[in-house]
Every structure is written in structure tokens, then in C-alpha cells.
């Protein structure tokens, strides 16, 4: 009996960690890279974007019913893909989520599709298939529980979690 | 953490609990046409039973939408034999049929209930049965009597003694319950702090329940649920073949959500759909020959049908850009599904021969339709003031009722099969 309780508690705690929104979309990025006084335009020399900054972006948000990844998330995914490529021992879990509208089962599939899209992008950027596992939480684990677009837009999301975080 | 990861722990947090705390309460909205007026008289000696058996019978019949209960006050003592019945009196009360009966305790401590169903106009007996039962079987006996009356009077099988399954969510707590078709007598089957989804009955009445991992839960034995599909990614949307020998489910082990068939123990796995799109929510036709499913292969989620042995899918829905959750009626003639119309999710039925479509409900978020085993009623999930409740609508759309629990979300109803007599 004790063992049972322990397992249940462990589970709840573990989940608690995973569901806490990982610091996302912090306006920190712009403040770290203040718009420098632009000296004579340097020919597109790829600035080695500080990886720590892009790696802190862990979520991709979607339009209603959609699973395509908007351009604004590409730099972050590029950074994560590169990081995984350089750290083959690292594993990542991608959790796809949906808002509460529509069929629960279809939402499981839609969330999976969202997570799968993120995985494909990461693999394209250098990660290996075995490093990333896409799964779906469907509409079952909403971060925000109001029944309005303000919440729904937060729940249409994929989260990237590194091994140790889930 | 992934659902896959916590799956092995699931067994540790399952509790086999007793009767559920809060019962479903029923509210009837709207009435049916052509109701049969019936007088269910109190049974002589009924007080020997723990519950009023005639009250349960009368409620069953009224809630079916097919009967109208006639006032039975002022009759004392209640007749127990046909010779004691004052037929002109019941004719004047406009009853077409009436039920009389008696209950008594037997010397061995068991109970006996016998009843007769009478035709008031012909002044004759239509049928009757005697039951020997324990006190705990009072409810079930009442439902069986109601089933008998329903079948004799309508020519169709009654569903009062069948059971329904549904999920109750209170905070993070998910509970799988099974109750009588009237929502009473609920039992907790499974309790979990993680989501429980998509319960589906096997044809013989055992139970299958799904996490992102699929489990088969045997209801007759108090066993732990047995995992049957636990592949990389998500495992979901279980459906039984009518003969109970196959399970269809959605796996993502090869990429996007695709439909697979397997034996009920998870062996003999084979892929059924082959697309780059989402294919989900499989549902077998009653003859086992075809599978209906939801796919976004055409750019938006629509319902398709394909041979259960594999082959080319045929698109079934064309109106609107969101048609999901297909369920075929037990006679194979009607397709029920959910359609998004102007942002609202509504229950639709399609006559599969004429392809004519009818909107049955006008909810905001109607979900998870499930046919009663006689096809007359469709149970579904909806919400009232942002709280999940179950609702039932007759398949002609005329008669509705709602079943809810205070302070909890009720969702994903699944109507169980007829049980062997």
C-alpha cells in the first residue's frame, strides 16, 4: 500500500514539473540583444545567435485547426536542432497540445501532428530520429482553462522538453 | 513526462472502488410523439423490496419517450389478478395498457416479483413473468420488466437493463464509471490522476479503456487493466469489431496517426490506413465488413469509409470543414457524427441509403455520440454553463434528456451492448 501511494505521488510530482510552463517567449531576448547602433551595414554575416537565448524558447504556438510551424519559430527550432546535433546524448520529448474545441480523439491526432512537425524540423536541423519523441496530450492537459480564445491560443502549442525535465 | 513513460506506473494508481459518490441526475427536455399511455399500478407487497420497483419501471418507460404514465392513485388494494381489474375505470383514465403485480419474501429469504402486462381495450393479458431475486437485484429486475413491456408494446428491444460507461473529471481526478442506462447505480471502475479517455465496450460487455496507451479492462473479474498497445508516440481511439475478435486503434509508431488492427491482446498488429494525413476515430460497421474513420487527407477533417480488410477509402461527408467522430447505428442504416456549423459542434445523423443529413442537436460543444444498442437513442456529451454533462436524444430528434453530476465534468459516454438473458 505504501508503495502504491509513493508511486502515485511520484507521478503527480513528475507531471507537475512537466506541466509547469517552461519559461517561454520571454521578452528577455530583445533586451539581451539591444538594437545596436547600426554601423555600416555588414554584409549578411550570420551572427552566431547566442544559443542560450534561442534554446530558452521551448514552445511553438499554432492557429486554430492548424499544425504548420510559423516562420517566427524557425530560429528557435534551428538552435535546438543544432544543439541536439552537437549533443548526441541529449534526448527530447515534444508534447503537442490542442485547445478544447472539437473531438477529443481528433485532437490527440492533431496534437501528435503538431509535435511531429516540430520533430521533423529538428531532424532537418541535425537532430537524429532517436533523440526526439513526439507525443500528444490532445486537449487533456490545458495550460489555461478559460473557455475563450485568450486561453485557447495558449493551449494550441508544442512544448520541447529535454531529458531530465519530464 | 510522456504518457508512455508513466504507463507502467498506471497500475499503481488504479483503485477498484465501490459505488460512486454522486449519482447522475436526469432532466427531461422535450417530449416524444405517439406515446403509449400506460398505467403502472403499485405491486401488492412491494414494500418488501428495498426500492419501489414500480416507480423504477414507470420512470424507465417515461424516459424512453415512447410511453406516457397514467395517474394510478386511488386504487386500493392494487389488483394482482386480471379478474380483479376494473377495466372500464382504466379505459376512462385513457390507459391503453396497464401493469399489475405482486412482490413477496420467500421462506428462503429471497424475493419473488411477478407481474402481468394487460391490454386495457381488449381486457386481456399480453404477457407476464415471475422473477426470483435478491434484494440487491431489485433495480435490475425493474429494468428487465421495463424491457419486457417496451418490447411487447413497441416491437423493439428495450435497453433499460443495459449499462453505460462515462468519464467523470473533478479537478485533476479522472474516474471511469459504469452505471445503469438510467444513470443510477454508478460504479467506479478506474480512478486516475492522469487522463482516462475513449472507453469502448467490447461486444460481450467487457471493457476497454484508453490512455495514450490502450488497455483492456475486464469488468467481470477485478483484474488490473491489461495494456495492449504501447508504442512510440500516442496510442489511442480504440474500437472493437462486432465479433470481439479484433481491435482497431490509432498508433503513431510509423509517423502520423494511422489506423491499425490487432487482436484484443495486442498481437497480430497490422496497418490498415496508409496516408500522410491524420487518420483516426475508427468505428466498425455492425456487419464487421467496413470501418468508418476521420481523416484530414482532403485538407479538413471528414468522415471516410473503407473495407475492414483494407482498400480504398470513400469520402462520406462533404458539407462543412469539420466532420468527426463517426458512429454507425446497430442496424447499419444511420451514421451519427459531430459537425462544426458556424463554430458550434452539433450532432448530425446521415441516412446511409439516401445520404440525407439531419441536425439532431443545437449545442455549442456536443461530442462523443454513442448509440443505444436498440438504435433508438443517441447518448452524447455536451456542456451546460461550461460544465460537462451527458445528454440523450431519440434518433428522430424529438425526445431529449440530460444527465449530470453536480460540480463535476461528465464526458465520453459509451453505451454498452445488450447482455445475454
Image (cartoon, coloured by chain):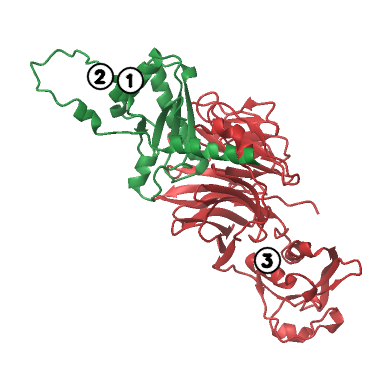
Chain colours: A green, B red
Q: Residue at x 68, y 54 (%)?
A: B18
Q: Are marks 1 and 2 in contact (CB under 8 Å)?
A: yes
Residue at mark 2 = A49
Residue at mark 3 = B60
Q: Are marks 1 and 3 in contact (CB under 8 Å)?
A: no
Q: Residue at x 50, y 43 (%)?
A: A104
Q: Is residue B78 above or below residue B55?
A: below
Under circle 2, the secondary element is: loop
Closer to the camera in the image, B337 or B61:
B61
Q: Is residue B353 left or right of residue B219?
A: left
Closer to the camera in the image, B73 or A139:
A139
Q: Is residue A80 left or right of residue B54?
A: left
Question: Which chain is home to disc 3?
Answer: B
Q: Are marks 2 and 3 in contact (CB under 8 Å)?
A: no
Q: Which numbered marker is on residue B127?
A: none
Q: Residue furthest right?
A: B107
Number of numbered labels in the structure image: 3
Tell me the quarter of the picture where residue B251 sits. Answer: top right
Q: CA distance from mark 2 to mark 3?
A: 69 Å
Q: Residues within 10 Å of mark 1 (few under 14, many from 20)?
A: many
Closer to the camera in the image, A136 or B108:
B108
Q: Is residue B60 above or below residue B218?
A: below
Q: Residue at x 10, y 16 (%)?
A: A41
Determine if residue B315 is in view.
no
Q: Earlier in the sequence, mark 1 or mark 2?
A: 2
Question: Which chain is home to disc 2?
Answer: A
Residue at mark 1 = A79
In the image, which is nearer the foreground, mark 2 or mark 3? 2
Image location (x, y in percent) of residue B66:
65, 67
Q: Are marks 1 and 3 on the same chain?
A: no
Closer to the camera in the image, B95 or B357:
B95
The N terminus of chain A: image quadrant: top right
Amino acid at each position: 500500500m505504501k508503495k502504491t501511494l509513493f508511486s502515485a505521488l511520484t507521478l503527480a510530482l513528475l507531471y507537475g514539473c512537466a506541466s509547469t510552463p517552461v519559461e517561454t517567449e520571454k521578452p528577455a531576448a530583445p533586451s539581451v540583444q539591444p538594437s545596436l547602433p547600426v554601423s555600416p551595414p555588414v554584409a549578411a554575416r550570420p551572427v552566431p545567435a547566442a544559443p542560450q537565448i534561442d534554446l530558452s524558447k521551448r514552445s511553438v504556438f499554432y492557429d486554430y485547426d492548424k499544425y504548420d510551424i510559423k516562420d517566427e519559430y524557425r530560429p528557435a527550432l534551428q538552435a535546438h536542432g543544432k544543439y541536439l546535433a552537437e549533443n548526441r546524448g541529449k534526448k527530447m520529448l515534444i508534447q503537442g497540445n490542442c485547445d478544447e474545441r472539437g473531438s477529443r480523439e481528433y485532437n490527440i491526432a492533431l496534437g501528435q501532428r503538431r509535435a511531429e512537425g516540430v520533430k521533423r524540423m529538428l531532424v532537418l536541423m541535425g537532430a537524429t530520429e532517436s533523440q526526439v519523441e513526439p507525443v500528444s496530450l490532445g486537449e487533456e492537459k490545458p495550460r489555461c482553462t478559460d473557455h475563450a480564445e485568450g486561453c485557447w491560443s495558449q493551449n494550441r502549442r508544442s512544448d520541447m522538453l529535454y531529458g531530465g525535465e519530464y | 513526462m510522456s504518457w508512455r513513460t508513466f504507463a507502467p506506473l498506471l497500475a499503481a494508481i488504479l483503485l477498484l472502488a465501490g459505488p460512486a459518490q454522486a449519482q447522475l441526475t436526469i432532466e427531461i427536455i422535450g417530449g416524444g410523439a405517439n406515446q403509449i399511455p400506460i398505467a403502472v399500478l403499485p405491486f401488492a407487497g412491494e414494500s418488501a423490496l428495498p426500492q419501489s420497483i414500480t416507480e423504477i419501471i414507470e420512470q424507465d418507460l417515461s424516459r424512453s419517450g415512447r410511453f406516457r404514465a397514467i395517474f394510478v392513485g386511488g386504487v386500493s388494494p392494487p389488483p394482482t389478478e386480471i379478474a380483479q381489474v376494473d377495466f372500464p375505470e382504466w379505459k376512462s383514465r385513457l390507459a391503453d395498457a396497464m401493469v399489475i403485480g405482486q412482490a413477496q419474501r420467500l421462506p428462503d429469504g429471497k424475493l419473488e416479483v411477478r407481474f402481468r402486462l394487460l391490454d386495457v381495450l381488449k381486457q386481456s393479458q399480453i404477457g407476464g413473468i415471475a422473477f426470483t431475486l435478491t434484494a440487491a437485484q431489485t433495480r435490475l429486475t425493474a429494468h428487465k420488466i421495463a424491457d419486457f413491456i417496451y418490447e411487447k408494446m413497441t416491437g423493439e428491444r428495450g435497453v433499460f437493463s443495459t449499462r453505460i460507461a462515462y468519464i467523470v473529471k473533478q479537478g485533476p481526478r479522472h474516474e471511469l464509471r459504469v452505471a445503469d442506462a438510467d444513470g443510477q447505480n454508478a460504479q467506479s471502475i478506474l480512478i486516475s490522476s492522469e487522463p482516462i479517455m475513449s472507453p469502448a465496450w467490447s461486444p460481450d460487455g467487457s471493457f476497454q479503456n484508453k490512455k495514450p496507451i490502450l488497455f483492456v479492462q475486464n469488468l467481470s473479474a477485478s483484474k488490473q487493466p491489461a495494456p495492449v498497445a504501447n508504442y512510440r508516440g500516442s496510442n489511442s481511439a480504440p474500437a472493437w469489431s462486432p465479433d470481439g475478435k479484433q481491435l482497431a486503434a490509432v498508433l503513431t509508431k510509423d509517423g502520423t496517426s494511422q489506423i491499425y488492427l490487432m487482436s484484443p491482446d495486442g498481437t497480430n498488429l497490422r496497418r490498415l490506413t496508409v496516408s500522410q494525413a491524420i487518420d483516426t476515430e475508427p468505428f466498425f460497421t455492425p456487419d464487421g465488413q467496413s470501418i468508418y474513420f476521420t481523416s484530414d487527407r482532403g485538407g479538413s477533417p471528414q468522415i471516410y469509409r473503407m473495407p475492414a480488410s483494407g482498400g480504398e477509402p470513400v469520402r462520406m461527408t462533404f458539407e462543412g470543414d469539420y466532420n468527426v467522430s463517426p458512429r454507425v447505428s446497430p442496424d447499419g442504416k444511420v451514421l451519427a457524427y459531430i459537425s462544426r456549423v458556424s463554430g458550434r459542434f452539433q450532432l448530425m445523423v446521415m441516412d446511409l441509403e439516401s445520404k440525407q443529413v439531419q441536425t439532431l442537436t443545437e449545442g455549442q460543444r456536443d461530442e462523443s455520440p454513442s448509440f443505444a444498442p436498440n438504435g433508438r437513442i443517441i447518448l452524447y456529451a455536451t456542456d451546460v454553463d461550461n460544465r460537462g454533462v451527458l445528454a440523450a436524444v431519440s434518433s428522430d430528434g424529438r425526445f431529449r434528456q440530460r444527465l449530470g453530476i453536480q460540480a463535476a465534468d461528465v464526458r465520453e459516454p459509451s453505451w454498452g451492448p445488450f447482455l445475454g438473458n
